Image: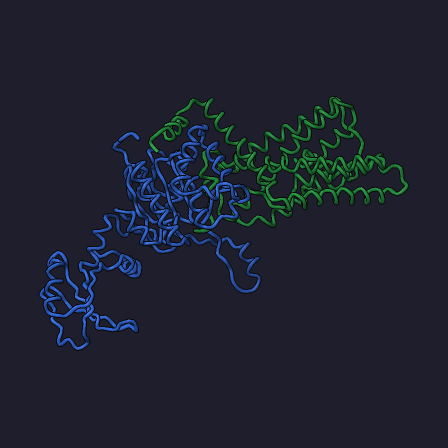
Chain colours: A green, B blue
Amino acid sequence: MTGPVATSTTGATTAAPAGHLAAQARALVAIGRQSVRSALAVRSEVLVSGVAVLVRVVLVILVWRAVYGSTPEVVGVDRSTAVAYAVLGAVFTNVLNPFWRSSLEMRVRQGRIAVDLLRPVGLVPQTLAQQVGTTAAAVPRCVLAVLLALVIGALQAPAGGVLGLLAFAVSTVLGVAVALLCNLVVAMTAFWTLEVGGALMVYRAVAQFASGALIPLWFMPGWLRGTLEWLPFQAQVFTPLSVYFGTVRGWDAVGAVAVQALWVVLLALLAQLVWSRALHRVVVQGG
Amino acid sequence: MGATAQPMIRAEGLVKEFTRPVRRTGPLAGVRSLLTRERVTTRAVDGVSFTVDRGELVGYLGPNGAGKSTTIKMLTGVLVPTAGTVEVDGRVPWRDRTRNARGIGVVFGQRTQLWHDLPLRDSFELVAKLYGLDQPDYQRALGRFTELLDLHEFLDTPVRGLSLGQRMRGDLTAAMLYGPPLLYLDEPTVGLDVVAKARIREFVAETNAVDGTTVVLTTHDLVDVERLCRRVLLIDHGQVLYDGDLAALRRRYVPYRDLVVTLAREDDGPLVAPPGTTVVERPRSARDTARVVVFRFDPAQTPTPAVVAAVTAEHEVVDLDVTDPDLEAVIAEIYSSGRVRA
């Protein structure tokens, strides 16, 4: 292999920083796309997870309709908003707090982390690219669930027209970013404890509750809501949904989105910091 | 490949320690294990030094738990050494991890770098993108490996559907696709049948001979070693026991050769051992229909043809065979005694 292949490899290592970054970006895109295909590869799995989210959406609609009964409004939230919120909350949590454990934690446990560490791409960007891919693979089933809710009249279009929809989209992307980074940081504790199954389950329960995916933060007592506002969880689900329903609008919405962006930056820095500490602690399971 | 004087791998006083909390036993063992602050430290690698030159093919041997895989993981940059220095192609692997990754190929026999649910070809395409191969280079390399390792039949089969031998060939291709000058093979033939093993060996030998790829091979299969390696590094309890020529190691342990003779008759009279030989009578097995006798001699002192001529002159012989004692016995003795004879 002294031919052109070897040449191109050495070419890549001596490339200018800009070229290096572009190569890294292409590698990450490739990992992301591979993760999408991998997540969609097993048909029965795709089918089951699709049915699961549809069933969940139908169930939360039934439950919230029953909770309200004939009461038109609870603490200023009307029946149709509460039901619609529950629908979107169910869809968000399906993607952001999945039942399967984080890919990173799984790979540490199986010793497969050794393979990841041998790639010419950093572990943190690599893991994030994988997670973005898996999240993207969940989009079709989410769209399906939202369409179902629209058809049975449990969901209405977002407040604020096209601009509102745009704001919701931006806020959703940031919410997903916050969730992925939170998952990553928690999963990285696997480098210290090796067994984070329990920690991840607790985290998942807290995140579902504190992000407002299960119950809107509107219904929570003032002290609790005040506390949760200082945590990154509400930036995952509650912020995008507040934008959707127009409970924050105008400059408030811009502010809320800015807070999300701030969380993304802080969590990305935290992830890098944790990784630089973890580097020396890497233990690879198995011979 | 620039012919520099700098070795491909230079390891000096490598040490790796693992620390873990003490496991408690008895009542509430789980909770007490969690709460304990007591920790035990084990030294997996304890002061290992060696160099590997460009183009060498080195066997890295040792019993289970000797520290082989831990060393490989430090060389590849997966693990950070507790002490000592390691340089691969002039770089410190763990500090310069991504750059080091471009220059090495790694195959772990016990785990795979391929994507479980996707066709084999998809994994290769991802590897090509990860290592920045352009299409023509990728197609050329893939074509060559498909030919060499006979991948045609299963290029489009999902990896989970491959046999172990096929998966291994896939892993080898993935590791070599981008033409790394250095290849680590960690038990590449473990669990494979004889045909699959032979194919992998052939490929490794060709890669080393034709491309000049430096190969570090870890294995428990001594046939791998005999077929492929001129030089071996023996390690146990984290320390190097032997570093050198394989033939020299064998000579040091077994400076003899056996002439195995089947005599025509059981009652051939008293055995006459030619000068320079000793008779070792072989325990009879059910298959022996005639008397089998072993004449042991040092080929450096007594030439083999002379021994054959002397024996056949004295006895009526129906069959004879000259054997070198196998490497397995040598290695078994080193492992059990924990040291190499001077």
Residue B82 is left or right of residue A163, and the answer is: left
Which quadrant holds residue B144?
Answer: top left
Name the outermost residue toward the right: A70
Indicate the position of residue B180 as horizontal and vertical percent values.
37, 35
Which quadrant holds residue A16?
Answer: top left
Indicate the position of residue B330 as horizontal and vertical percent values.
26, 58
Residue A281 visible in the displayed image: no
> Which of the pair B133/B206 is nearer the observer?
B206
Vertical comparison of B227 with B133: above or below: below
Residue name at image x 29 percent, y 58 percent: B328
Residue A156 visible in the displayed image: yes
Q: How many marks?
A: 0
> What quarter of the picture does the N terminus of chain A occupy?
top left
Indicate the position of residue A161 as horizontal and vertical percent values.
78, 23
Residue A92 is left or right of residue A16, and the answer is: right
Vertical comparison of B94 with A162: above or below: below
Residue name at image x 64 percent, y 46 percent: A44
> Which of the pair A168/A71 is nearer the observer?
A168
